[in-house]
Each structure stands twice: as structure tokens, then as C-alpha cells.
Amino acid sequence: MWIFDNEIASIMGSFEDGDIVIVHDFDGYPMGKGFINRNSKIRVRLMTRNTEQEIDDAFLRERLENAWEYRKKTVDTSSCRVVFGEADFLPGLVIDKFSDVLVVQSLALGIDRFKERIVDILKAILEKDGINIRGVYERSDAKVRKNEGLPRIKGFIGDEFDTNVQIVENGVKYYVDVKEGQKTGFFLDQKYNRQSIRKLCKDAKVLDCFTHTGSFALNAGQAGAKSVLGLDASELGVEQARKNAELNGLSDTVKFECADVFDKLPELEKAGEKFDVVILDPPAFTKSRNSIKNAVKGYREINLRGMKLVKDGGFLATCSCSHFMDYDLFTKTIAQAASNVHKRLRQVEFRTQAPDHPILWAANESYYLKFYIFQVCDEK
């Protein structure tokens, strides 16, 4: 799906960055059509393998209809990722649906030219299913746009509207701030992973680290946890998490604290605290291969600390959302942490991202989320 600058032998003809071009291999075989950008190391992002295909409204409609039909078959679509870039053959584009609001993130120059046409076509597709979109907000404020020679922007596409949206996921209600929240406002990729911890949390004492706006913590609370403590370094996130707890009638059970997890876990250990369930859902510690060594140290440290806080026979849910922290390296790092603190791990299950973030085998970058649940036992 990606052709890098150092893979191109020659370029013929005239074009502007963002234009659609045809790509041939070394012996002239047509590989497909995509948009070119000389500002980016990803020189061409392929849109189609069919060089006879016109990249027009009919093409975009087909791509979007396929994406929506796939979601209807695989996930709860009340809130979901409708378009996941290369995995939906619309490279550089993310569109999330939060109830009746769409959030658009454009990360590449070529797709940026199509975004408003895409929004109009998608709204018409959803309307056929009785879904009337009341507003569209753009969150193209990611740093990676600089690699494309694009400015970071955010704002309304079309009419202004209230950007605080209420959604329901797994029976839990959330306020989602699509304007100021992280990424597009809410992390939909953990939808079914959040559901998977519920069976472990009844009557449990639960610690949720890097809680963001409280999603794992609230699933634990609604599942009947005895007590839940959610930790996050963001005061804005913690404030939102408390509002979400109140929205679900869980304020007495589910508490949140603004704290650096790396500082707080040793404090809890020193105080002799133990938990039935510990959840580790950190942000990506690395977004490039260059910083992978430091990321490994970070993942090993939090898993080591997390395991020490789990009661003998309790459970640890741990994950990585970094593509560069691949399955083998993440698994090895967890094993090292367990060895260092003399814990035995029994794997309950391994999961990845929700199906509305499909993993395309032709695009390795589409596979990024690794999620384990372990029973943690003392060595005896």
C-alpha cells in the first residue's frame, strides 16, 4: 500500500504533490494508482490496484459503502471507527462515528483533497440507514501531518454544533469531547477488550492505570467491583472520568486520582496495597523504531510494578498500542518483568484491536494493539 522514496527508480511526466499517479514495477507491470507527495518519505500511497479505475465520486462511494457494510456485520455501530485508513483502502484517512457525530482525521496530502467529498458521500450512506449526522468535526491536528508538508488543523466541517457528545458502549455511558479529547476524542479500539475484563471484576478491588476518561475503570465498576481506583497524569482526563462515573451512578465505587503512574505504583507498593485486578493501558511509549529501547524499559517497568500489586491468584490486564512494540517484543518484555519479580503468569487470553480497526495483512502498520489478560501467581 505504501511506496517509499528510496524504492522509486524514476518518475516520468509532470504532476503536483497530491495528484493521482500510476505506478509500474521494474519491468513495466502496472502496480496500481495512488497519490504522490514529494514532501513525504511515503512517496506514493496506493488507492487501487486497478490502473483503469477512475478515482472519482463513484470510487469513493464504493469504498465507503464497503467500509460501512463491514462494520454493520462485525461491530456495534452506535459508535465505531467507520474508516481506518489503509485497512479500508482509503490511505491516510480516519473517520470515527460517535452516536450522531463524525470526527475526521486526514493524515496525508492526497486524501486531504477528497475529505469534504468523502464526508458528504458518507453522510448520504448513513442516512439510508436512518442515521442523521448532526455535525462533523475535523481533528487533523496530529504531528505526522508535518511529514506530509501539511499544517495541523482542527475545526468544524460544515455547521457548528455542541462538541460534547454522549455515547453508550457495552452499556456504559460516556461524555466524549471531540474537540479537546485525545486523538478523535475517545479510544474505540479497546471496545471489546474493556468488555473482556468485566467477568474478572465482580466483588474485586481494581486498579486502572492510565485510565484516560475512565473506560476500563467504569466497565469494572458496572461489573460489580467492590472498589476501583483509576490513575492518569492528565487533570482534564481525570475530570472527564469523574463526570463519566457520575453519569453512570458509580461515583461511590469508582474513584479517580491525577497522578504519574510511574511514581504512584511504587507508592502503592510501599503502602502494602494489593489488588484483585490491575489494568495497564498506557499510551504508546514509542512511535518510531529509534526509541524502541526506552519504550521496552517503560513497558517492563510498569508491568513489573503492576504484577507486584496483584494479589496471589489475581489478574493483570496489560496492553501496548505501539505498532513498533510488536507482538514478540511485547511478549518477551512481559516475561522478563514476571521473571524479575518472581511471578508465574497463566495466560487467560490474548486480544487485539476491535474489528472496526481491521488488520490488513498488506499493511503491517494496521496491526498495533496487543492486549493480554494473565492470572498472576507467586512462585511457590
Image (spheres, helix red, strand yellow):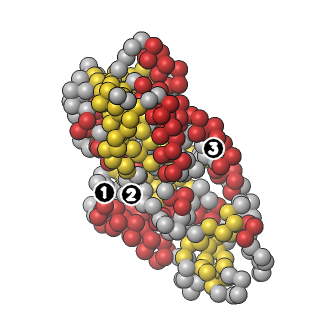
| Residue 220 appears left or right of 258 | left
Residue 206 to residue 2: above or below? above
Give the residue type at disc 3: Ile
| Residue closer to the observer: 131 or 265 | 265
| The N terminus, quarter of image | bottom right
Residue identifier under label 3: 292
For the residues bearing labels 1 and 2, Cβ distance under 8 angstroms? yes
Residue 103: % across, % down: 46, 50
Residue 132 visible, this angle: yes
Residue identifier under label 1: 75
| Residue 250 appears left or right of 359 | left
| The C terminus, quarter of image | top left
Residue 69: % across, % down: 33, 67
Q: Which one is earlier in the sequence, the residue at label 1 or at label 2?
A: 1
Residue 35: % across, % down: 64, 70
For the residues bearing labels 3 and 1, Cβ distance under 8 angstroms? no
